[in-house]
Image (spheres, rainbow, N blue to C red):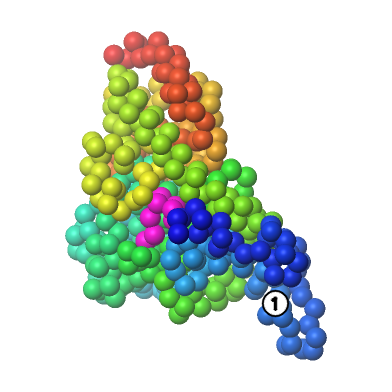
Amino acid sequence: MSTQTQIIHSIPVDPLTGSISVPIYQTSTYVQEAPGIHKGYDYARSNNPTRKVLEDVIAQLEGGTNGYAFASGLAAIDAVVKLLSAGDEIIAVDDIYGGAFRLFTHIYQKFGISIKYVDATDHRNVAEAITPATKLIWIESPTNPTLKIADIKKIAQVAKAHNVLLCVDNTFASPVSQKPITLGADIVVHSGTKYLGGHSDLISGLIVTATQQLGDKIKFIQNASGAILSPFDSWLVIRGIETLDLRVARHSQNAQAVAEYLLTEDLIGNVYYPGLASHPNYEVAKKQQKYTGGIISFDLKVDDKELAIKIVSNTKYFKLAESLGGVKSLCCLPCEMTHKSIPQEKRYAAGVTDSLIRLSVGLEDAADLIEDLKQAFAIAKKEVEVFV
Ligand SMILES: *Cc1c(COP(=O)(O)O)cnc(C)c1O
C-alpha cells in the first residue's frame, strides 16, 4: 500500500454514526454508570476520543507503538525530558532548535539535568561524549536552520550499545520522509505546528514511542503535567495529516528548484539544502530520506545583517514570519528571530551567521517563488554596492 493510501485509511470512520470526518468531542468529562464504571473515558485531560484518533494515526505513521498529542512541540519535548532525573545528562545536537536549547539550558539545568552539545553529523562525536550519567541523546535531522544531516541508524547503534535513549525531533523531515523508530530510535517528537498541521493555523506537539513501556511513561507524564492538545486542534492536525505526503512531495519539489536557482545568484554565499549534491551530507540524506524537504537556508557573501534584513523585508510571496511547513512560503532571519536566544558565539559555531536567511518553501508555483526572490535581491543589490 502506498503511503498516501495508508495515511487516508488509517483515519477511522466514526464507529457510532458512520461519520466520515472524525467527530470533535468537545467535552471536559464523561458520565459514569456507577463509580469507576465508564466507557474508557473519565476526564478529558486523561483521554479524549478525538485526540486518541490523532495519537493512533501518528503512532502508526511513525511505525511506533504509542502516540501522544500535546499543546505545542515544546510541551512534547518537555514531556520527554521529564523521563529524566536530577544528575542525568543529555547529549544534544549542536544545531538544535532554539526553543529546545532554551528549555534544556534555562529550565532543566537548574533542576540538575546537564546538557552537552555535539556535532551529530559524525556519530563518533556522539559516542565520545557519552558518560555514565548520559541518559538521553537528542538529535534533529535535518537540523534547523543549517540542515545538517545525522545518520540516525548509526547514532541509534551508539545509543543501544550504551543503553541510552535516543529521541529524534522529526519535525523537519516529517514521517512521510523518514521514520526514525524504524532506524532504531526510541522516541520521536514533532512540532505538529509545522508539516503535520501544514496550514499555519495551530500549535501542537506529538510524541511517538517505540515500545509500550516507554509509551506508558509518557502517558503518565502527559496526564500528570497536563499539556494536552485540544479536541479541535487535534481534529485540525488529523485533517492536515490526510494530505501530508502530497504536500511534502510538492514542498520538496519546489524547494529543489529554488535551491538550484540560489546557486546561480551572485549575492549568495552558502546554500544549505540536502537535495543539492554540494551538501556535505547529501549521500546520507539520499539514503535516509524519501524527500529532501521544504526548508532552505542561505547566507550572503558579505555577512551583513542590514543587507539580509533588506532581502527578507522585500519579498512578496515569502512572508516574513517565524515557523515553517505551511502552504504559504515564509522567510525568516534566524539571528533576530528563531535563534535570538542562542549566544552569538554559539550561533556562529553552528553556522548561523547574521546574514543567514531561512526559507520555508510553500506550495505556490516554484517559478513565482523564484521571481519573488529575484526582485528582492535586485532591491538589496542596490545596497550591496555600498559594501563591496
Ligand atoms: C517549531 C519547532 C519546535 C517547537 O514546536 P512548537 O510547536 O513551536 O512548540 C521544535 N522543534 C523543531 C525542529 C521546530 O521546528
Q: Is residue 271 visible?
A: yes
Residue drawn 35% across and 70% down? 165
Residue, disc 1: 41
Q: Is residue 379 above or below residue 44?
A: above
Q: Is residue 199 above or below residue 305?
A: below
> Quick one: quadrant of the C terminus?
top left
Does dot 1 land on a helix, a strand or a loop?
loop
Relative depth, front residue between 245 and 329 = 245
Residue 109 image offset from top left, x and y in percent: 41, 63
Q: Left or right: 157 with respect to 232?
A: left
- Residue type marked 1: Tyr
Residue drawn 35% across and 57% down? 139
Residue 316 image offset from top left, x and y in percent: 54, 23
Q: Which residues are magenta?
A: 173-180
Image quarter of residue 37: bottom right
Graded by Cα atoms within 10 Å as few (under 14), some (14 to 19) or many (20 or more), the crowding at tag 1 reads some
Image quarter of residue 266: top left
Residue 130 image offset from top left, x and y in percent: 25, 67
Image quarter of residue 273: top left
Residue 119 image offset from top left, x and y in percent: 26, 52
Q: Any magenta on residue 211? A: no
